[in-house]
Image (tube, helix red, strand yellow):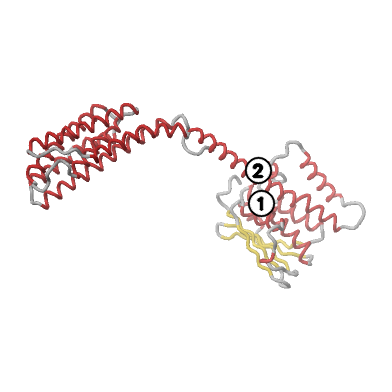
Amino acid sequence: MQLGIPAKLAPILFAQALSRLLLVYSAYSVIFAEALIILAGWHENNAWVMWAGFLVGFPGFVLWRLMFTPLSPLSASIYILFLSATLAIAAWAVLATMPEVESTKFLPFTLLGFALITACGVAARVGDRVLWALGGYLATNVALLVGAELAGKPYEFDWRILIGLIIVIGSVISTPRLLRANTKFQITLDHSAETLATDAERAENARLVAARLHDTVLAKLAVIATTKPGMLQDPLREALESQLALIETSDYSPEQVKHSGTSESADLTDLMAVISTEEAQGLAVNLGGTPTALLSLSTERREAMCSALAQCLANVRLHSGQSAVEVVILPAGDNLAVTVIDGGVGFDVDAVPEDRMGIKLSVRNRIESVGGSIRIWSDTGQGTAVMLQLPVTGGGDA
């Protein structure tokens, strides 16, 4: 996993982005200048100034072509010459027909000068951009000087245009240097992202292993602790030996945790194995509803449902004080619902500690990890009902 863009492509992509950004600034400057000149002419009822304002907008068509086609020095040269000529005409029209404008130091002219400077975005290299910016600055002052001479008014040096030139050149020069200076942080970010991904994978694997251990070995050890002294029954001993052998294998992996004990065939072997295991421990399981509806689940969800059901039945046997339980399997729209009901001592649902692995790992987390949900109804002395729901679609291969 990487954050940001590849280091090798960064200089090219940033150069293209900076070029487009400069041309966008140039377009906005032309638009604002055109609007201000037209408004000034409209306010003074001056047709000459209004026509000059409309004329200023025509170079924008050339700029539009520059922004959406490969950058070309020829088209950029046409744009600068065209905009310089319209700036000279606008300066003459404003200075000659608007007495209140006494010199070339007029805001719309400043904006057009900035548009000429930012036309340097047509260049791809730093040095070329600096030259284009200087050329735009020179063209601005020549156009204003020509317009002032034609109108018979003084040319006044505009510091605002010079400041704009300094800002543009500073940005053009500093951006590539900042990019090179920060390249080393890309490696750090990449390594950090990989570490986070690895940690997340390890946490998920640890959760799967803990859930499997709780469902198998720890559950069997709990059964052993409650049995009478003496030899273990053959089914219990064989199940415990096979599970210990699985853990001891050198190639034990999270994939084995996910798929161990599951059948790829679409039958009810897993469900009947869960019920048989609990009945062997003395719990009478009354299965109702439509058990074959379990076949509508994907392999992964069917395994999760059976594992969660096994833990629910173990909880009934160990904690409810009852020797019988009802299991009802029914389709519920787009979901499959498995409800486990007992008439035991019950418990306070809100008081269950977060560290109770049976409820948290083997039931809730297992069901929620494959897109399902769990609801528990219980109260002291009122028995318990647990509903496990899983969607029948979107769960991978069935």
Label 1 with label 2: CB-CB less than 8 Å: no
Q: Is residue 34 above or below residue 144?
A: below
Please report the residue visible at 58 percent of the width from the left and 57 percent of the height from the top: 335
Task: Indicate the quadrant where residue 308 lies.
Answer: bottom right
Q: Nearer the viewer, residue 170 or 227?
A: 170
Mark 2 — residue?
Answer: 202
Q: Residues within 10 Å of mark 1 (few under 14, many from 20)?
A: many
> What's the distance in space between the residues labelled 1 and 2, CA to CA?
20 Å
Report which quarter residue 120 is drawn in.
top left
Q: Is residue 110 visible?
A: yes
Q: Is residue 313 left or right of residue 302?
A: right
Residue extending farthest to the right is 230
Q: Is residue 166 left or right of residue 305?
A: left
Which label's residue is closer to the chain start, 1 or 2? 2
So how many labels did they put on this image? 2
Q: Amino acid at mark 2?
A: Arg
- Image x and y of residue 188, in percent: 54, 36
Residue at 68% x, 42% y: name it: 254
Which label was assigned to residue 304?
1
Q: Which mark is residue 207?
A: none
Q: Nearer the viewer, mark 1 or mark 2?
A: 2
